[in-house]
Amino acid sequence: MAISNLFKRILLVPILLSSRLLVLGLRVSKRGSGTALPGLIVSKYFPFAFEALVNQIPNIIVITGTNGKTTTQTILNSLLSQSSEVKLLRNSAGANLLQGILSELMRQSNDFGSLDFTHAVLEVEEATLPRIAKALKPKIIAVTNLYRDQLDAYGEIDITEAYIRDGIAQSPKAIVVLNGDDPRTSRLADGLGNQTHYVSLPPEYTDSLPYEGETRNTDEIADNILRSQNIRINDDLTTSFDIQGTVDNVDVQYHNAQISSPGFFHVYNALTAVTIGKLLKIDDQKLMQGLKAFEPAFGRGELLVKTEGQKSINYRLLLIKNPASFTLNLDLLRKIPRLRLILAINDNTADSKDVSWLWDSELELLNEANIDWIFCTGVRAKDMHLRLKYAFLDPAIPISTMESIQAAIDQSFDKADDGETICVMPTYTSMLEFRKRMGLMLN
């Protein structure tokens, strides 16, 4: 066995050299950033490489679920980074399939295939979890929620739930952290024997969430649950809240915690990250410092600034992926005094080829917003405009349609006054293009 493992490590050297040359070629030719292709090739022809790399990291934390994976991972990264003892690896570019995770492991290893990290926080796509759970041997698995997602990618939500439960079942030693309010996530570990922790929001918030089924009453859970109280959405769209409960049978109580991601639903992500931080024995002061230091992940409440001459315009990116994320962000927009909005809809594979989900989203919420104007852009700009036509009670609301995202940026900049903020709700590939047009790329 020792010889076999040694031989695998020796084989990693030419594999890593080849993958780095491939990444270099992709970037020089401007054909990609290399976040997934090297892993795709290596996983197909050298499947042993994944386990040989990931098994070098003692503490693997997996975050999965329909919405909130990247934000939860980013918050947890901020919490763990406060501790000098933690050397952290994460798939920060959001490449959460096997090939993306493997590409990140190869990128972070040295030329001899060695990884010098104490922890890895990995965002893992739901259907990928059961494929790699045995190799990962995770210490902790966190599940954010299970909303109805892209039907052309996953089919019915029962299939997604089965994927995640299978991944947990293959990880009997993993501690599981679940959204206790979501009826689908809260039952994922039932009968499996894993140590399980829960997070929960007050009923006045959970009642408005599009869960599949009746929201679970978490009052029956006495131990190993963190609850938020006194949630406040601030004028700058940051969120303040209190935390109380227990983690690993230790009392937890924090007052006036704050996160910069817009929307009360991100409190779930913060509670999940704090729970994991406590399980990893990060002290309370560092946890609160980490929450304060957290900055939104790319596209998830991120604020971009475009400046020309003496004029600067802010663009607040609020990623939408499915009816749940669209509806929750639309609800948030009702709080903005003068709403200037760009809806950027693509139909690439990463967005969902089937755009019928636009009709399952509650665009009618915009009737309660104070709207200055709306731009529809992206490949499916006309579909978005049509959906708005049926949503609005007032036909006089100014809506402009242009497929070119660059044109939407240019015209919105000209239309807005210096210092104003424009909200941008893009699908995934629209978000990437928007950031690229603004001069930003993924790391």
Image (cartoon, grey):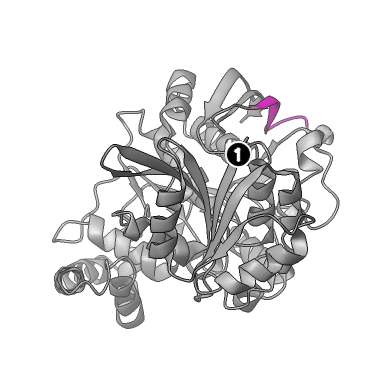
Q: Quadrant of residue 208?
A: top right
76 or 60: which is nearer to us?
A: 76
Q: Could you tell me if residue 311 is visible in this image?
A: yes
Instruction: Classify residue 84 as left or right of residue 120.
Output: left
Residue lying farthest to the bottom in this orientation: 45
Q: Is residue 224 magenta?
A: yes
Residue depicted at 56% across the width and 36% down the height: 270
> Vertical placement of 434 versus 36: above or below?
above
Label 1: which secondary element: loop
Instruction: Classify residue 87 as left or right of residue 337.
Output: left
x and y percentages locating residue 240 in the rendered image: 60, 25
> Vertical placement of 248 versus 304: above or below?
above
Residue depicted at 45% across the width and 60% down the height: 408
Q: Could you tell me if residue 249 is visible in this image?
A: no
Q: Using a 10 Å C-alpha cutoff, classify the residue at mark 1 as few (fewer than 14 neighbours), some (14 to 19) or many (20 or more).
A: some
Which is the main secondary structure of the residues drawn in magenta?
strand
5 or 191: which is nearer to us?
A: 191
x and y percentages locating residue 93 in the rendered image: 37, 56
Q: Is residue 131 magenta?
A: no
Q: Which residue is disc 1 drawn over?
A: 338
Q: Quadrant of residue 222?
A: top right
x and y percentages locating residue 10 in the rendered image: 16, 69
141 or 228: which is nearer to us?
A: 228
Quadrant where the N terminus is found in the figure: bottom left
Quadrant where the C terminus is found in the figure: bottom left
Q: Which portion, as a residue range, is magenta?
A: 222-232
Amino acid type indicated by mark 1: Arg
x and y percentages locating residue 265 in the rendered image: 65, 41
